[in-house]
Image (spheres, rainbow, N blue to C red):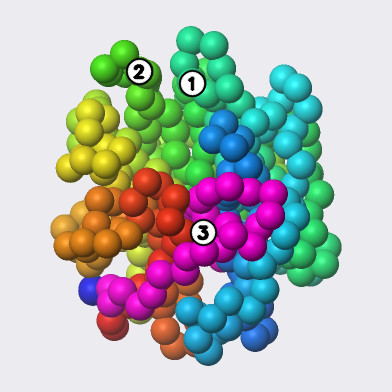
Amino acid sequence: MNWIKCGHIKGLVQDVKWSNSYAQVPTLLLKEDRLRVYFSTRPRQDMTLTSYCDLDINDLTKVLYIHNEPILPLGEPGTFDQHGIMPSAVVEKDGLVYLYYSGWCRSVGVPYNNYTGLAISEDGGSTFKKAFQGPVLDRTKYELFSATSPDVFFDGDKWHCWYCSGTNWHHINDKFEHTYDLKYASSPDGLNWNQTNKVIIAQSNSYEAITKPSVIYINGQYHMWYCYRGSFDFRSGNEGYKMGYATSTDLVNWDRQDDKAGIAPSAEGWDSEMIAYPAVIKIGSDVYMFYNGNNFGRDGFGFAKLDL
């Protein structure tokens, strides 16, 4: 498979008056005549909130609407989403839109803790209300550090979730850097999740960080794209995020094949240092990937079309 890069959506933050930078972690909801893209943006460097824009499904470079308010408030002091809310996965079911999001709060000892929250919309994904004050994916006796950045899939009788699970904090160049693998959870209702501690995409070494899976069914097989990085020179160097890839026939067991991801950083420009946080969707007969580039989404997001 090969992805053909199609465009770069930038300048969104100029129209989000309460924000200063970033359109990070594009998260997709297909509407009748438009593609809604939820994204995380920053009023200041130590705070993230979520808004959205609508793109024309006939011309994905055309922005139809930019929402100028955060869709969710930060959590109360001491809660898991006190300092940040970042979208990650959307499921539309029975007239409701389920938005799974990464909530984070600043910490002592390490920079932050982050877990997964759930908000539900009754009006097609325009406004949301948190399902709980606490997370739906949380710290367990096996998972000590984080459970976040999921993709969620409902297959008719069961909810499936693949998420980023913290493996360690490494002290590197006077900073703590987080590492993570991908794990699997299941649920009967999308609200209560069984975190089995099953690793589906393992680290290739203890300093690798793997995150933001996106799963789609194409040609009789499940395909997952995700991103991975190193820990020593990843913010603007050669260990920045790259795209990974895996396949499965049962949604639980995955075969990692990063050399077949079909997309890489560009030779120059906005996505030349990293490509990160994929979100894959089928629109008609076409498959698209939305993703962030350099600086984790500071310059907006772009998209590519799968050459089938």
Asked where in the image residue 127 lies, by quadrant, the reply is: bottom right
x, y percentage for residue 229?
27, 40
In the rendered image, which quarter contains the C terminus? bottom left
Disc sitting over residue 111 in the figure: 1
Residue 99 in the image: above or below residue 30: above
Between discs 3 and 2, the one toward the N terminus: 3
Residue type pointed to by label 3: Pro
SS for tag 3? strand
x, y percentage for residue 274?
28, 51
In the rendered image, which quarter contains the N terminus? bottom left
Foreground pick, 19 / 301:
19
Does the residue at mark 1 contact the one at mark 2 (Cβ under 8 Å)? Answer: yes
Residue at numbered disc 3: 26
The structure residue drawn at horizontal position 50% and vertical position 86%, both measured from the top left corner, is 59
SS for tag 1? loop
Residue type pointed to by label 1: Pro
Between discs 1 and 2, the one toward the N terminus: 1
Asked where in the image residue 104 lies, by quadrant, the reply is: top right
Residue at numbered disc 2: 175
Q: Is residue 306 left or right of residue 102?
A: left
The magenta span reads 3-28
Numbered disc in front, either 3 or 2 = 2
The structure residue drawn at horizontal position 67% and vertical position 73%, both measured from the top left corner, is 65
Between discs 3 and 1, the one toward the N terminus: 3
Q: CA distance from mark 3 to mark 1?
A: 24 Å
Q: Is residue 92 left or right of residue 13?
A: right
Residue type pointed to by label 2: Lys
Q: Specify few, some or many for label 1: CA neighbours under 10 Å numbering under 14, 14-19, or 20 or more.
A: few
The structure residue drawn at horizontal position 22% and vertical position 33%, both measured from the top left corner, is 233
